Amino acid sequence: MIPEAHVLVVDDQPDLCEMIRLALEENGYAASLASDGASMRHALAARATDLVIVDAVLPDEAGPELITVARRYGAKVILMSGHPEQIERLADGDMPFLAKPFRIDELIACIRETLGPADGEDGSEPAGQG
């Protein structure tokens, strides 16, 4: 378990990022948002990050490069995409992925599998579900 794990969400869809941020905070995770590769790099340099949830298709950089950058900072990665062919091409055997659209409970379950439960969680039903 990581005490208040920090999760960076990288996607060029502001509404999706905000929805994910709210869900993360409701479930005990600290969250930051980035809309492109440059802002992702800035966020990773500014704060220790446990997990990066990154869209496979961003306007300024390709998924493989972003995955490499996140891992260079010691963060685990969850890949998400609305393009199944991108996920198949980019996801390796040890990297979880989410196909858009996904449900928030699927996202939280994927994060818990990757990081463990957020600090203070007792394993009960996460907030915001039901």
Image (tube, rainbow, N blue to C red):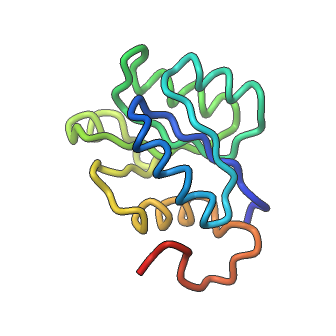
- Measured from the top left, where is residue 98 in percent x and y? 36, 51
Across the whole image, how many numbered discs are drawn on residues?
A: 0
Residue drawn where x is 53% and y is 40% of the image: 9
Relative height, residue 57 to residue 85 (above, below): above
Q: Quadrant of residue 3?
A: bottom right
| Position of the N terminus by quadrant | bottom right
Q: Quadrant of residue 63?
A: top left
Residue drawn where x is 49% and y is 51% of the image: 20
Residue drawn where x is 69% and y is 29% of the image: 44
Residue drawn where x is 61% and y is 67% of the image: 27
| Position of the C terminus by quadrant | bottom left
Looking at the picture, tell me which residue is in the foreground, 109 or 90: 109
- Measured from the top left, where is residue 52 in percent x and y? 57, 41
Q: Quadrant of residue 5?
A: bottom right
- Measured from the top left, where is residue 93 in percent x and y? 41, 48
- Measured from the top left, where is residue 60 in percent x and y? 42, 14
* Apparent side of residue 129 relative to residue 82 in the rendered image (left or right): right
Looking at the picture, tell me which residue is in the foreground, 86 or 104: 104
Relative height, residue 81 to residue 20 (above, below): above
Looking at the picture, tell me which residue is in the foreground, 118 or 84: 118
